[in-house]
Amino acid sequence: MDSALGARPGAGRVTIGDVARAAGVSIPTVSKVINQRDGVAAATMTRVQQVVADLGYETSLVARSLRSSRTGVLGILVPEFEPFSTELLRGISSATTGTGYELLAYAGLMTGADRPGWERRSLSRLSGTLIDGAIVVTPTTALSSSSIPVVAIDPHTGPEGHATVDADNEGGAVQAVEHLLALGHTRIAHLRGRADLASAQLREAGYRSALTAAGIVVDERLVRDGDYQEEQSASAARDLLTLVARPTAVFAANDSSAIGVLRAATDLGLRVPEDLSVVGFDDVPQASITVPPLTTVSQPLAELGSRAVELLLTMLRGEAATDHVRLSTTLRVRSSSGPVPRD
Amino acid sequence: MDSALGARPGAGRVTIGDVARAAGVSIPTVSKVINQRDGVAAATMTRVQQVVADLGYETSLVARSLRSSRTGVLGILVPEFEPFSTELLRGISSATTGTGYELLAYAGLMTGADRPGWERRSLSRLSGTLIDGAIVVTPTTALSSSSIPVVAIDPHTGPEGHATVDADNEGGAVQAVEHLLALGHTRIAHLRGRADLASAQLREAGYRSALTAAGIVVDERLVRDGDYQEEQSASAARDLLTLVARPTAVFAANDSSAIGVLRAATDLGLRVPEDLSVVGFDDVPQASITVPPLTTVSQPLAELGSRAVELLLTMLRGEAATDHVRLSTTLRVRSSSGPVPRD
DNA sequence: CTGTTAGCGCATTCAT
DNA sequence: ATGAATGCGCTAACAG
C-alpha cells in the first residue's frame, strides 16, 4: 500500500492528482472541468468544482505552460528594477488590467561580464512558453528570431528589426538646448551617455544640431563622457567647471548625470541656477526632489509602457501592427535652469 | 538524414535535446555539464559548452522547476504595479543584486469579485516550484501553510501567522497629528482608510491617541471614510469642509486620500495651507509634485523591500529568523501644512 | 461521458 | 564516463 502518497495534502502543493483522488475521478476529467471543456456530466462537474474549492487547488503555471501553448501571461523583461523600468511597469500594469492577461516581470539582475545579452538569456528562460508575449525594456541587442511576439521599449540599438516603442530622443535634446539658448546661454556643455547606446547618440545629435542651428560652433572641449552615471558625470563636471572659460550651462544626457553635475557644482561652491544652469533627461521621480528641482526632458514613461502593451496585444491577436511607435517628449522647466550669469 | 530536425533552431526554442544532438552526446550528459556535476570527461565537457554557447541555449525555467526543487528565483507577488509596490520593488531589486538570485514579480491583476484571495491564487500558481521563496505585498489573508518560505510586506491582517515586514503605522499617525497640534490646530479631521485593513485601523488609532493625549476629545463628525481612494476622499472632504464648524486641518489615511482632499479644497475655493492644512501618509513619489507639495508621513518603502529580502534569504538558508521587522516612519514636512488660520 | 495513453523539457537514478 | 529509463503536473488525442 502506498500509504503516504495521497494522504497528506498539507505537506506540499495541492496537485490535480489530489483533486482527482478526492473527487473519485480521473485526472483528465479534472483537467476538463478546470479548462471549461465540455464532455463532462453536470453532476461530475459540480462535484469536481466543489473539491477544487475545498482544497484550494490552482493549476500550476509551470506545468500548464509546459504542455499548453497559451498561458495568459505577459512577460516584462528588465535588467533590474530601477526608477525607469518601474515607471514603465506602472503604465504596463494599468494598460493590461481588464484584458484578461496577467503580468510577470522578470529581472535577471546580471552584473559585470554577464550583463550584455541578458535579454536573450531571460527571454530564452521564460520562453517555451511561460509567457504568451514579451515586452523587453532597453535591450542592447536585436531580438529578431523569437518564438513569441516581442515588443522592445527604448531599444539601445535603434528601431531596426523588431516592434519598438520609444521616445523622441533627438527632439527632446533639441528642446533642452533651445531652452538654454533662449535663456541667453552660449557656452553650453554636454555630458553624453554611453557611446554604444542609440539613445545617447541621438541626444548628442540633438545637442549638436540645436547649437549649429543657432549659429554656434560646438566646442569639443565642452563635450565629455558621463556614461549615464552619476559618479562619472560628477567627475567630468568637475573638470568642466574648472576650465578657464567654463560653461554657463550643462545639458546632461540623463537625470543621473545631471544629479552628478549638481553635486559637482555644489562641491565647487557654484550656485544653481545663478552660476550654472543644468538640464537633464528622463524626468525620473527623483528629478523633482533634487536641490534645486531639476529642469529636465520628460519622457512619457507610463505611456511608453501602455503603448507597448497595446502593440503586443495587437500582435497577439495576429493582426498586423505598425511596428514602430515614437512618442514625443516635453521639457519640464523647474529650478535648475536660469538666465545666463552676467559678469 | 533527419535533416530538418537539428538544423533549424530559428523555428522554436533551442532545447537540451538540440544541444545533445549537435554535440553528439545524450541529454543527461548535457544536463550534467550545465549543472556543473562531475562524471563528464573534460573533452566532452568543453565540446558541450561550446555547442551551448553557439546555439545560445539556456535552460528553460519552466522545465527545470518542474523537475528540480531549486530555481534560484525569488517571487514578488503584488496585486498590481502601482507606486507603492514599484517602490518596494526597487528596494527588493537592489538588495537582491549580487545574491545569485533572480527576481520574478507577478501581478494577478484581479478586479472586482476575484480580488480577495489573489495572494493565495498567485502563490499557488507559482509554487511547486517556479520560485524558491516569495515576498507577498499587502496580502489580505494569512498565508500560513505554504510549501515555500514567504515574507509578507505590510500585511493587511496584522503580523500574525507569518514572517512580516511593516512600518510603524500608529506611530506615524501620531507624528502627523502632533505636527498639526504643534501648529495650533485643534479641529483636526481624519479620513480613514479601508476598515478591513490593519494599517487603516492603526492609523486611526494613532490619530485618536494623539488627540486624546493632547486633551482633545475626538469629534466623531470629523472622522469620515476615505477608503484609501482619491474619489471617495474628495467627496467626504467636501462634506467636511462645508460643515459650519469646519476643521482647520485634515489627516488623511494615505496620500491618495490627501490628494482628494486637496482637490476638494481647491474646488471650494479654500487655500492650502492658509485656510486648511492637509497631511497624508505613505510619501509616494507623487506626493512631492502635488500643489502644494504634500506634507506626509514617509514610509521607508525601499528599505521595507530590502529588509524583506534579507529576511527571506535567511529563511532560505534554513536559519532561524526574527519573524517580524517593524521600521519607523518619518514625517516629511512640505507645504500643505501651516499654522492654524486666525479668524 | 469517462479513462487510458502520450509527451512537453528537463534532472535524476541506475545501468552499462 | 555515458546513456536508457522514469517522472514532475498537466493537457491533447484517442479509446472505451
Image (spheres, coloured by chain):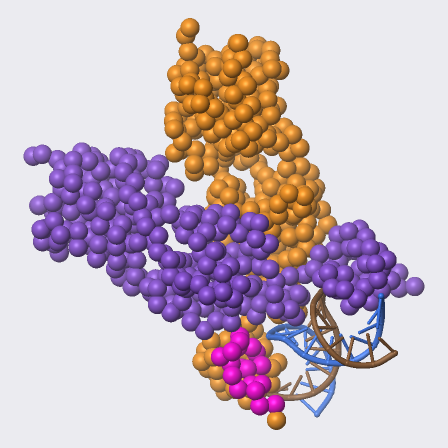
Chain colours: A orange, B purple, C brown, D blue
Where residue A146 appears, as percent x and y from the top left, is 70, 52
Where residue A47 appears, as percent x and y from the top left, is 49, 85
Where residue B99 appears, as percent x and y from the top left, is 57, 53
Which residue is painted at 48% across and 47% down in the image?
Answer: B90
Question: Is the residue B68 above or below the residue A216 in the image?
Answer: below
Q: How many marks?
A: 0
Image quadrant holding the N terminus of chain A, namely: bottom right
Q: Residue furthest front?
A: B319
Q: Residue furthest top?
A: A343
Question: Is the residue A178 above or below the residue B274 in the image?
Answer: above
In the figure, is residue B138 to the left or right of C2? left
Where residue A215 appears, as percent x and y from the top left, is 57, 10
Look at the image and tell me whether residue A134 can be seen: yes
Which residue is painted at 15% across and 43% down in the image?
Answer: B181
Q: Which span of residues is magenta-colored?
A: A2-19
Image quadrant holding the C terminus of chain A, namely: top left
In the figure, is residue B143 to the left or right of B276? right
Nearest the viewer among A96 and B212 is B212
Which residue is painted at 45% across and 68% down in the image?
Answer: B120
Question: Is the residue A240 above or below the residue A110 in the image?
Answer: above
Question: Is the residue A19 above or below the residue A35 in the image?
Answer: below
Which residue is painted at 38% across and 28% down in the image?
Answer: A291
Look at the image and tell me whether residue A305 can be seen: no
Q: Quadrant of residue B116?
A: bottom left
